[in-house]
Image: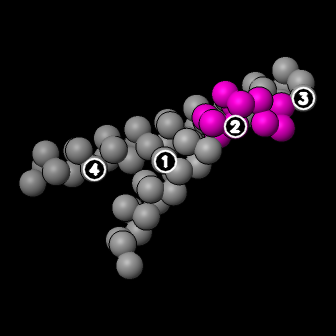
């Protein structure tokens, strides 16, 4: 089993990729509001990944 942080990062990336593909293909997007919601979810996932990466970078620099 992977460590929990690696698993979290992998799942966030996978969810971001799936959302990106769905947005590009127009899957389950029937209105502009649904589109904005999906783009917002994608942005949130990418922001979470950035925060985790920044925390890990800070930890490795502190050592």
Q: Is the C terminus in the top left, top right, bottom left or bottom right quadrant?
A: bottom left
**Circle count:** 4
Q: Secondary structure at mark 1?
A: helix
Q: Earlier in the sequence, mark 3 or mark 2?
A: 2
Q: Earlier in the sequence, mark 3 or mark 4?
A: 3
> Residue 37, position in %: x, y?
76, 32
* Residue at image mark 2: 22
The CA distance from mark 3 to mark 4 is 39 Å
Q: Earlier in the sequence, mark 4 or mark 2?
A: 2
Q: Residue at x 83, y 38 (%)?
A: 28
Image quadrant assignment for residue 3: bottom left
> Residue 31, position in %: x, y?
89, 24
Image quadrant assignment for residue 34: top right
Given residues 22 and 37, the one toward you in this image is 22
Q: Residue at x 38, y 79 (%)?
A: 1
Q: State which region is magenta.
A: 19-29
Q: Earlier in the sequence, mark 1 or mark 2?
A: 1
Residue count near mark 3 (Cα–Cα under 10 Å), binned few <14, some 14–19, many ≥20: few
Q: Check if residue 8 falls in the magenta segment.
A: no
The CA distance from mark 4 to mark 1 is 16 Å
* Residue at image mark 1: 13
Seen as rendered, the residue at the extreme front is 25
Give me the disc on residue 30.
3
Seen as rendered, the residue at the extreme bottom is 1
Q: Is residue 8 left or right of residue 37?
A: left
Q: Nearer the viewer, mark 3 or mark 4?
A: 3
For the stretch drawn in magenta, the main secondary structure is helix
Does residue 62 lie above or below 4 as drawn? above
Q: Nearer the viewer, mark 1 or mark 2?
A: 2
């Amino acid at each position: 089993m992977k460590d929990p942080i690696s698993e979290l990062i992998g799942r966030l990336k996978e969810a971001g990729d799936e959302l990106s593909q769905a947005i590009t293909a127009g899957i389950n997007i029937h209105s502009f509001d649904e589109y904005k919601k999906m783009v917002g979810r994608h942005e949130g996932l990418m922001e979470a990944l950035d925060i985790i990466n920044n925390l890990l970078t800070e930890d490795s620099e502190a050592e």
